[in-house]
Amino acid sequence: MSSDTTAAEEVKLNKRKKGMSQRVKNMISGYLFISPFYLLFIVFGLFPILFSFYLAFFQWDGLGDMTFVAFNNFSIIFNDPLFWKSIYNTIIIGLMGTAPQLVFGLLLAYALNSALLRFTNIFRVAIFLPYVTSIVAVAIVFSVIFSNQEGGLVNSFLGLFGVEPITWSRSEWGTKVAIATMIFWRWVGYNTIIYLAGMQAIPNDLYEAAKMDGATVGQQIRHITIPMLKPFIFFTVFTSTIGALQVFAEPQIFQGRGGRPEGISIVLYLYREAFVSNYFGTASAVALVLFFIIIILAVANLLIANRIGQSPRRGL
Amino acid sequence: MAAPVTEVGAKKFSGAKIFVYSMLILFSFASLFPFYWMFVMATNPNNVINETPPAFMPGTELVTNFQNVLNSIPFFQSLLNSFIVATSVTIGVLFLCSLAGFAFAKLDFPGRNILFIFILATMMVPPQLSLIPQYMIIAELGWLSTLPAVIVPGFMNAFGIFWMRQYISSAIPNELIEAARIDGCSNFRIYWNIVVPTILPAFATLGIIVYMTIWGDYLWPLVVLQDQSTHTVQVAIRGLMDDRVRDYGMILSGTFWSTLPLVVVFLLFNRLFIKSITDGAVKS
């Protein structure tokens, strides 16, 4: 825009000198600069995805020949009660681990945002610290905290109230509580920080105006904070949903490498089929089912977000 | 970064104030306690750990427990492996993603939008879908139990490209690029001399996110790094849980020392960390 005639002439000269127009040069560098991703993606993304679809229809132990078995792999897993158990566990543990995060994340963010204390950053760091811990470390620590022994931390604590020691890693709900606690502990700070960022973006005038109109704190939260936070809430619900469906390390560490029925998750079931039993065909079938579950839930999430997000909230 | 919204009620009602404080203190305690507990366990002999009531004070077995860890797994080797993997992936991702992000943001070429949307679409595919064939490819390449097995696939980062494109689009004025072209800069020179120095904050953000993700990654390293000498630290400390009779002092010693480096780095740069994680989430 601002280039004067001499500059324009210079460009033309340059072009002639190099013998290639800027458009062609941009094209070449453009493709060149994005090519590493696409090359990697073809090898480690596209081909594996397509091959998973292919492999799901074959029987294969990883070494011998592949045998075409049509939909047999699917009927094998659909007839395996453990597969359904893994889906059930994943959903229950996901809900138990993530739903409370929404509530407590919002409460904590609200507290961090409203408190005028000097220690805000200390609280913020403390609450966020678990997120820096690796999932494996979290799973190990909580496996010890939820130890089956009488002297385990949770068992001793419950013992104070006269509760008999619980064999956490062998009981249906004990396992779920332990795993959900791991998920909650590691992620609640993350969600809090996201909500906090959302709350800090809400202009103060809105609250001022509401206060002038005599709105109570509860009304302010209901009519200003929550509506303004919608995109942030959707984001965390979306990531929590996807993340919960991919739970693996927690049950695999808490209950042993092959897992157990009380805690086995979809991904652990897949891992076990593939890398413990060497049933690569059925494992691929599981991968496809997981893929479709994730797609369905992701789309559902987006649709709900759009539906709710569109509702007018102009006149507070 | 004090919020301008100072009070939404906490000040006026002391009841609300007490509630806010007690909740923050309670959750901070719950957040920090497992770290303290880890340290307590890591310094106590196993027989104390199994006593009722459990030990709450640090013991004297710090060194012994850690020596047991060293006898059980190649701890320092695994820490080094994790460091090599996370550092290489981070450097590679920062370079490749900023280069591609620059192309998508500032260079015009046919199919640019479709290619970009395609990259976004790949983010929707769960990694578990490609797990088995990826494993086969790694085996075919002869990379099983070698670090490239976890490094090279890590370079493929769709989110990074997306993030860099957004950042570069807004951070670098087109006039600047035009001016550089008039001076005869090639596109790569523009990237290297103009784009890279301008987007250092984006490098910090993406770098922290990638480093943390790769450092904590578990499933993929578990599958492809079968030889103990190539284990990353996550796979290695998981191995501590395998003994029939568990030595909790040793297990938590290994966990504690493997967790410490990242926690220390986080505490030193906590503002940058938290800002990076929020930006990475919120601005997309």
Image: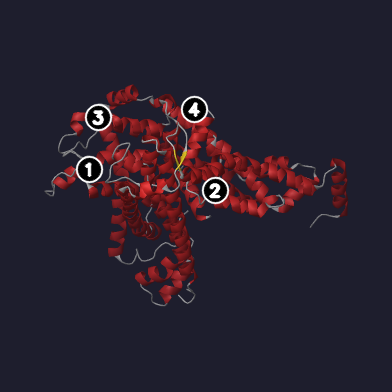
Q: Marks 2 and 1: which is nearer the front?
A: 1
Q: Along the polypeptide, which appears first: circle 2 or circle 3?
A: 2
Tell me which residue sits at (42%, 57%) in the image. Answer: A237
Q: What's the distance in space between the residues labelled 1 and 3, CA to CA?
A: 16 Å
Is the same chain shared between marks 2 and 3?
yes
Q: Residues within 10 Å of mark 2 (few under 14, many from 20)?
A: some
Q: Quick one: SS at disc 1? A: helix
**Residue, disc 1:** A170
Q: Is residue A143 above or below residue A99?
A: above
Q: Position of residue B181 (x, y in %)?
A: 78, 46
Q: Residues within 10 Å of mark 3 (few under 14, many from 20)?
A: few
**Labelled disc at residue B159:** 2
Q: Amino acid at mark 3?
A: Arg
Q: Along the polypeptide, which appears first: circle 3 or circle 4?
A: 4
**Residue, disc 4:** B146
**Which quarter of the figure has residue A147?**
top left
Q: Amino acid at mark 2?
A: Phe
Report if residue B181 is visible in the image: yes
Q: Marks 2 and 3: which is nearer the front?
A: 3
Tell me which residue sits at (43%, 41%) in the image. Answer: A281
Q: Is residue A235 above or below residue B203?
A: below
**Residue, disc 3:** B244
Q: Residues within 10 Å of mark 4 (few under 14, many from 20)?
A: some
Is the same chain shared between marks 3 and 4?
yes
Q: Chain of mark 3?
A: B
Q: Amino acid at mark 1?
A: Arg
Please identify the residue farthest to the left as the structure is shown.
A162
Q: Residues within 10 Å of mark 1 (few under 14, many from 20)?
A: some
Q: Amino acid at mark 4?
A: Thr
Report if residue A133 is visible in the image: no
Q: Position of residue B30 (x, y in %)?
A: 29, 47
Locate residue A6 relative to residue B9 in the image: left or right: right
